[in-house]
Amino acid sequence: MEFDEFRLAASTADLSEEPAAREHADCVEFRMDLADAPLDALAAYDGSLPLLVTNRPRWEGGETRPDGRLDALAAAVDHKAVAAVDVELATLRGRPTGENDASVADLVGRAREAGVTVVASVHDFAATPDPRTLDALSAAAARAGDVGKLAVTASDRDDALALLSATHRATRRGERVATMAMGEAGRHTRAVAPVYGSRIGYAPVRPEAATAPGQYDLATLRELVESLA
């Protein structure tokens, strides 16, 4: 999965929801950190949608403890249905990862060998950084992975506009990015950011199972993105 155009990911911790996502999604973001026995679920997966696997640590909004987190991701990229893996930019830059047999370099190497896209992600759950910082983060994430993901928190329309402007600048620089502003003030950016070059959108299969503030449900986001294309 090259993400050479916009792809809509259905976010879930339950792979049995995949059939319900097929009508609207291009892939499934499997939240391993929110799932029970995620590697067993992967082994049993026989759905038709490719998977983007995420095993988010607590320090960046997830639920996984450090020990074994990278090992689980490394095992996941060997699954034939896994097309992409999300790794935090901070992890790629050397943030301590706890006790793991696999290093982050091992994880990225296994992904490359398997032809699995690496999404390097950055999340700011408090604010939207200034434009210079947005540019630096998106550029660093795009260099570190095949796609740089930048999710910030918008408190007003100025923040939302800053995120969209940063998306436009990154695209013009030739960076492959996925961007969104979390929170109600940034909700519309999830539909609008693809106009400016964002390559991945995220939406829950079930509206009540949203994994980030301000998410649209899957069907609504697909309709909005297509209406603006």
Image (spheres, helix red, strand yellow):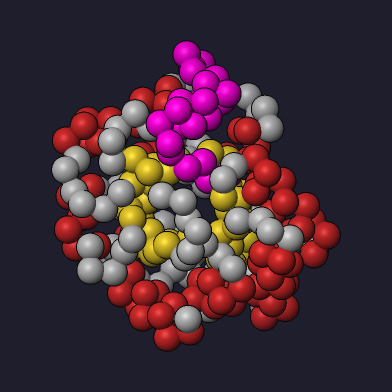
Nearest the viewer among 146 and 153 is: 146
Residue 222's place in the image compared with 129, above or below, is below
Residue at the bottom extreme of this rendering: 227
The residues colored magenta run 98-120
Q: Position of residue 188 (x, y in %)?
A: 53, 78
Nearest the viewer among 145 and 211 is: 145
Q: Position of residue 207 (x, y in %)?
A: 31, 68
Residue at image location 26% in from the left, 53% down from the top: 49
Instruction: Tell me, yes or no, if residue 30 can be seen here.
Output: no
Residue at image location 56% in from the left, 65% down from the top: 198
Question: Which quadrant of the view contains residue 206?
Answer: bottom left
Residue at image location 57% in from the left, 50% down from the top: 147
Image-based side of 75 in relation to 91, left or right: left
Q: Position of residue 205 (x, y in %)?
A: 28, 63
Q: How many marks?
A: 0
Image-based side of 144 in relation to 16, left or right: right
Residue at the top extreme of this rendering: 101
Nearest the viewer among 209 and 53 is: 53
Residue at image location 47% in from the left, 13% down from the top: 101
Residue at the right extreme of this rendering: 132
Q: Position of residue 220 (x, y in %)?
A: 35, 78
Magenta run includes residue 32: no
Instruction: Tell me, yes or no, if residue 27 can be seen here.
Output: yes
Magenta run includes residue 109: yes
Image-based side of 91 in relation to 131, left or right: left
Image-based side of 110 in relation to 183, left or right: left
Question: Which quadrant of the view contains residue 128?
Answer: bottom right
